Image: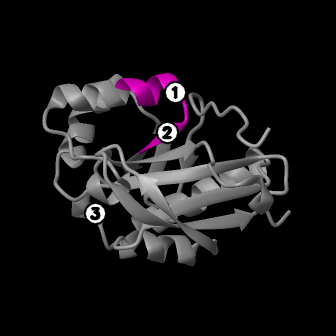
Amino acid sequence: MINPKIDISRTFLETERLMLRPFKEEDLQDFFEYASVPDVGEAAGWKHHRDIAMSGKILDLFIKDKKTFAIVYKQNNKVIGSLGIEKSQFPRTYCPGETARDIGYVLSKEYWGHGLMSEAVKRVIEYCFKELNLDHLTIGHFLDNHRSQRVIEKMGFTYVYTKPYMTSMGITLDSREYILNNPR
């Protein structure tokens, strides 16, 4: 059971500056606002949203799949990003424990460079290890995404290998893959 079922639909996590909670239909405008900005989605492997209908479809998936947190900035109560607990694609040889999941995230360009994603990822790691009791977390970033690389390394993930990754845009990019073991 490398990818156990995840359901964050009733999970609310808090940090000093952020609230991580399930997405709601009312988040559509905030979601479109950051997802429509060029370079935001592309850094994560998806094309920025061209219209609010596209954002609506993705938001519906976030709500239905119950594995993606809305990142809410407490100061203005605005949704500024998302953080998903996705299925890990790591080969079993790197994940000898029973359970693993992958973390994927995106943040509004307006909030880059303030340590907010590190704050969110740190809290989700704690949740995954202490409350979900996962054995491993995996994560990756494209070679030119140095912001994500800094977050990943700051959180203590260990680089394992680089692999080609087919993005939803239909292009293949090299992705650096990392793992973090539950310290128990």
- The kind of residue on which mark 2 rests is Thr
Query: Which residue is label 2 attached to?
Result: 68
Specify the segment rendered in magenta: 60-70
If the image is split into quadrants, where does the C terminus sit?
Answer: bottom right
Q: Residue at x 34, y 43 (%)?
A: 168
Q: Position of residue 115 (x, y in %)?
A: 41, 71
Compute the Cα span from label 3 to label 1. Answer: 26 Å
Q: Quadrant of residue 57?
A: top left
Query: Which residue is label 3 attached to?
Result: 111
Compute the Cα span from label 1 to label 2. Answer: 8 Å
Q: Residue at x 60, y 36 (%)?
A: 11
Using residue 83 as the reference point, say whether residue 8 is left or right of it.
right
Pointers 3 and 1 in contact (CB under 8 A)? Answer: no
The correct choice, above or below, for 179 with respect to 113 in the image is above
Query: Which residue is label 1 attached to?
Result: 65
Q: Residue at x 44, y 31 (%)?
A: 62
- The kind of residue on which mark 1 rests is Asp
Query: Could you tell which of marks 3 and 2 lies nearer the N-terminus?
Result: 2
Label of residue 5 in the image: none
Q: Residue at x 47, y 65 (%)?
A: 175
Query: Could you tell which of marks 3 and 1 lies nearer the N-terminus?
Result: 1
Using residue 143 as the reference point, say whether residue 46 is left or right of it.
left
Q: Secondary structure at mark 3?
A: helix
- The kind of residue on which mark 3 rests is Tyr
Mark 2 residue crowding within 10 angstroms, few (<14) / some (14–19) / many (20+): many
Q: What colour scheme governs how the chains and residues are painted in the rendered image of this protein?
A: one colour
Residue 64 shown in magenta:
yes
Mark 1 residue crowding within 10 angstroms, few (<14) / some (14–19) / many (20+): few
